[in-house]
Image (cartoon, grey):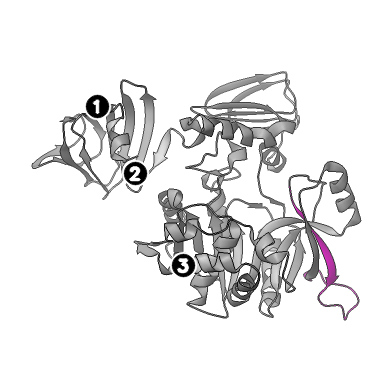
Amino acid sequence: MIIPVILAGGSGTRLWPMSRELYPKQLLKLTGNHTMFQQTLLRVCGMDNVSEPLVICSKKHRHSIARQLRDVDVTGYDMVLEPVGRNTAPAVATAAIRVLSIDREARILILPADHLIEDEGAFRQAVKAADSYASEGYLITFGVVPDSPETGYGYIRKGQPLEESSGEASASAAYRIERFVEKPDQRTAEKYVSSGKYCWNSGMFMFRAADVYDELERFSPEILSACREACSRGSSDGRAFCLDEAAFDACPSESIDYAVMEKTGKGAMIPFSAGWSDVGSWTAMWEAGEKDMDGNVIAGEVMARHLKNSLVISEQRLAAVLGIESCVVIDTADALLVADMQRSQDVKSVVSALKAEKRREAFCHEIVYTSWGTVTEIESDEQCAIRRVCLLPSKRLEFVSPSDGRLHWTLISGAGTIKRNDSEVAAEKGVFLEIVGESSVEAKNTGQEPLVFIEVCMPGSSGQHLAEKDGLY
């Protein structure tokens, strides 16, 4: 049995301002009608001998991930929540520990949640080939046959084919791994591609859970020990399993490439060509997009004049772009990026600067997703915060308001009840409610449609907005 393990904990900072810490690129619809995470899910659904997926994600993304699973009708899954990010080796170790408790012969297919694969048939063929080798004890990585000298990817040099009796390797053959190499400069990348001996490192793997567990114990015992502790001290919370924070925080942060694959003698690579991209920058997004006759990739309401070889995305308003070439223009509701295409990798430094200044734009969008619905910030300053709050059907919102704040709710659609201490009122269009002083508040959606209200929140003497102080959002 193959168990897909979807690694959905990345932050995607190079795709800011669309991708943000609390709503990163794997949760966005960048290349189709589904998000990157949903595309990864659907890619493995229906494959032969594949079981329900194991999703490993950040605790911060739990509710967004759960919502996206529901949206594509994936109801059978296992979810593990990481309290902190620790790279791919601890994630793989955690997956192996959980799978071994079910089936020692199971193979785990490690898939980053934010990759684009255009040819799903070629991908499935590569997975089928990998399964046969993984069943024999090999630790398989998938190498992408390069079609250009990319400097943004790591490379793998292939050695001899595992099956040499026929003289030539088959199309689905696996090769011994001669070595991993870091992201090269342009000249070196050109040499790699022209040699035909190198593949891009896709970050996708397949192996038996027992085999990768043994190799982790041999080469990275500190990681395995910390993950065992995090699992044993973890706890279930509804549909998710939460790793113990203290134990997982103490785990070394390493990639599975460095922790195991570069050291093991059991490693092998299957090359494949399937229109793969990690969509790791705006340049990669432009390369993967459908271009017009001037080489532009355009999405949203855009007026383009004398524009060439550029990427322009406008989410909410008209963007007029005139007389530029090889540029990136990304316009969202609260942030605008304009960059030279060749400098798109530097967006990460912009995000770092925003985080240093503790700017909200580095962490979240105007819309924040919660377990019970969404909160859209309309305006916020030191005097008040105005938000649109959407409570989903059958959901409830409960909190205790502080003694020094003031909250106004105006109901604009939906049906439900609002209870303040021992007093309850019907929640329907036009109802106005004022909450002053310390109160126990419960809003409940009893209808079939979202319960929507406008919230005006004025801070108390602490200077914090009521909702911020209570930690609701």
Q: Is residue 47 visible?
A: no
Which range is magenta? 153-173
Camera-nearest residue between 195 and 225: 225
Residue at the image point whose x is 75% and y is 61% from the top: 272
In the rendered structure, are the residues bearing label 2 and label 1 in contact, judged by CB atoms less than 8 Å apart? Answer: no
Looking at the rendered structure, the kind of residue marked 1 is Gly
User: SS class of the residue under badge 1?
Assistant: loop
Residue at the image point whose x is 48% and y is 77% from the top: 101
Q: Which residue is mark 1?
A: 460
**Circle 3: is it few (<14), some (14-19), or many (20+) Cα within 10 Å?**
some
The image shows residue 410 at horizontal and vertical percentages of 23, 29
Camera-nearest residue between 140 and 184: 184
Residue at the image point whose x is 78% and y is 44% from the top: 151
Camera-nearest residue between 18 and 464: 464
Q: Which residue is mark 3?
A: 229
Magenta-drawn stretch contains 158 = yes
If you read the primary sequence from the N terminus, does the residue marked by circle 2 or circle 1 appear first? 2
Q: Is residue 331 left or right of residue 453?
A: right
In the rendered structure, are the residues bearing label 2 and label 3 in contact, judged by CB atoms less than 8 Å apart? Answer: no
Q: Is residue 267 left or right of residue 300?
A: right
User: SS class of the residue under badge 2?
Assistant: strand
Q: Which of the two marks, 2 or 3, is nearer to us in this view?
A: 3
C-alpha gap between disc 2 and disc 3: 34 Å
C-alpha gap between disc 2 and disc 1: 26 Å
The image shows residue 127 at horizontal and vertical percentages of 67, 68
Q: Which residue is mark 2?
A: 373
Residue at the image point whose x is 24% and y is 26% from the top: 460
**Circle 1: is it few (<14), some (14-19), or many (20+) Cα within 10 Å?**
some
Q: Is residue 215 visible?
A: yes
If you read the primary sequence from the N terminus, does the residue marked by circle 1 or circle 3 appear first? 3
